[in-house]
């Protein structure tokens, strides 16, 4: 297997106290779109900064396209493109002028500059506004310009930190269409961070789930969702939680593969939801627990996150919440 990223036991501690990465192990195959999925504060940006040679790890080893980010940082820098989460273009000049600045910084020879820039503007769908001030661009257009800047030198691997944060669904889709077509044309590996599960689900070939500085699960979106299995039924109950006795009754049901309680939601994974749903409702009501709402879904990446991290991806969840939930995850 040709590895674009190969990380072994990487630890990063900020200012001697905040352990942002706690022994990360990760392999990303060349030519794929890889999503690093995790909630805010889980260490995603830190890992990208290490892989793009901005920070050194405290310990462990990280290779990008076969080169060590610490001892061969010059080589790594020549192979990577990077789009940070923060804005990385100037708004008081045109799109073309931004690309020209980047081309000069990257050392693109003057004879090929113009051609490369025009190609880049065209490939990212900004030909009509190349000579317009970036100020007047939409958020999605700015993002695409930033991507064009990073792609000017045809990197082997492109790192994007939360590429579509704050964009509406249509703009997100356009950004991904452009990234996907670029990947197809040049075989560029795409490594992106996100806390949007639907973005990881829709656009990646491989996902690594990160929680509190550790990669807790990797796989294709399908593999990850299949690993949860069956259907996910969510029973919204009155009150904060159910007591252990009731939880145990449900856990012991033959039909129930897994059961989790998260705040006032009792989440049951089963292969036979038609039978399990009324059965669990009857049991809960019999124990004096009022069921306010029931919903049934195929597992999504949030369910995957809940299974392996013990907390919801989207809500974040406090540490206390995490411990409480984790303590109660049991297999049926
Ligand atoms: N420059 C820094 N100095 C100190 N702590 C930091 C710094 N950058 C990030 N952290 C901390 O490291 C942890 C991981 O942060 P980060 O990598 O930014 O996560 P994410 O990108 O997943 O939101 C957080 O607890 C954050 O507060
Ligand atoms: Mg971040």
Image (spheres, rainbow, N blue to C red):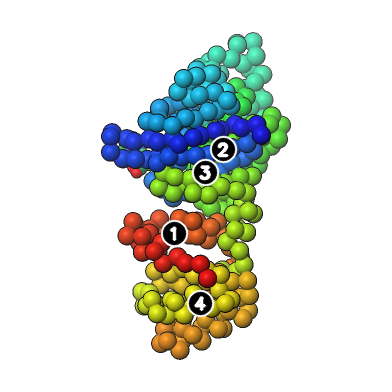
Residue 88 visible in the current orientation: no
Marks 4 and 2 sit apart, C-alpha to C-alpha, by 38 Å
Among the 4 quarters of the image, the one containing residue 214: top left
Q: Residue 218: percent from the left, percent from the top? A: 56, 47
Callout 2 crowding tier (Cα within 10 Å): few <14, some 14–19, many ≥20: some
Marks 1 and 4 sit apart, C-alpha to C-alpha, by 20 Å
Residue highlighted by disc 1: 310
Residue in view at x 55 percent, y 83 percent: 279
Disc nearer the start of the sequence (1/4): 4
Marks 3 and 4 sit apart, C-alpha to C-alpha, by 35 Å
The reply to whether discs 1 and 4 touch (Cβ–Cβ < 8 Å) is no
Disc nearer the start of the sequence (3/4): 3
Residue highlighted by disc 2: 27
Disc nearer the start of the sequence (4/2): 2
Does the closest atom of ligand 1 sit within 8 Å of the Cβ of label 2? no
- Name the one closer to the observer, 265 or 331: 331
The reply to whether discs 2 and 1 touch (Cβ–Cβ < 8 Å) is no
Does the closest atom of ligand 1 sit within 8 Å of the Cβ of label 3? no
Look at the numbered disc 2 and give the secondary structure of its residue.
strand
Note whether 221 is above or below 243 in the view shown: above
- Name the one closer to the observer, 163 or 246: 246
Residue highlighted by disc 3: 36
Residue highlighted by disc 4: 252
Q: Residue 118: percent from the left, percent from the top? A: 65, 24
The reply to whether discs 4 and 2 touch (Cβ–Cβ < 8 Å) is no
Marks 2 and 1 sit apart, C-alpha to C-alpha, by 24 Å
Residue in view at x 69 percent, y 37 percent: 181
Horizontal side of 8 relative to 111 (left or right) equals left
Marks 2 and 3 sit apart, C-alpha to C-alpha, by 11 Å
Residue 263 bears which disc, if any? none
């Amino acid at each position: 297997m040709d590895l674009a990223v190969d990380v072994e036991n990487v630890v990063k501690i900020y200012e001697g106290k905040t352990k942002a990465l706690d022994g990360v192990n990760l392999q990303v195959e060349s030519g794929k779109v890889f999503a690093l999925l995790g909630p805010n504060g889980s260490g995603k940006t830190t890992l990208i900064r290490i892989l793009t040679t901005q920070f050194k790890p405290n310990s462990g080893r990280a290779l990008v396209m076969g080169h060590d980010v610490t001892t061969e940082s010059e080589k790594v820098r020549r192979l990577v493109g990077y789009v940070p989460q923060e804005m990385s273009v100037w708004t008081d000049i045109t799109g073309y002028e931004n690309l020209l600045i980047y081309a000069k910084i990257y050392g693109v020879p003057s004879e090929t500059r113009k051609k490369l820039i025009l190609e880049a503007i065209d490939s990212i769908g900004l030909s009509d506004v190349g000579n317009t001030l970036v100020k007047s661009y939409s958020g999605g257009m700015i993002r695409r310009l930033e991507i064009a800047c990073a792609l000017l030198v045809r990197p082997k691997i492109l790192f994007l930190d939360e590429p579509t944060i704050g964009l509406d669904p249509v703009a997100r889709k356009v950004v991904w269409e452009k990234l996907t077509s670029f990947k197809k044309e040049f075989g560029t590996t795409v490594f992106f961070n996100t806390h949007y599960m639907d973005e990881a689900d829709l656009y990646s070939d491989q996902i690594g789930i990160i929680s509190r500085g550790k990669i807790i699960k990797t796989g294709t979106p399908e593999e990850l969702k299949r690993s949860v299995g069956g259907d996910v039924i969510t029973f919204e109950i009155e009150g904060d939680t159910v007591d252990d006795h009731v939880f145990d009754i449900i856990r012991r049901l033959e039909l129930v593969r897994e059961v989790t309680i998260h705040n006032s939601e009792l989440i049951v994974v089963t292969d036979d939801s038609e039978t399990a749903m009324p059965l669990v409702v009857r049991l809960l009501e019999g124990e004096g627990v009022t069921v306010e709402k029931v919903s049934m879904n195929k597992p999504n990446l949030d369910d995957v996150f809940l299974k392996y991290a013990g907390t919801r991806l989207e809500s974040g969840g406090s540490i206390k919440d995490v411990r409480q939930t984790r303590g109660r995850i049991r297999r049926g």
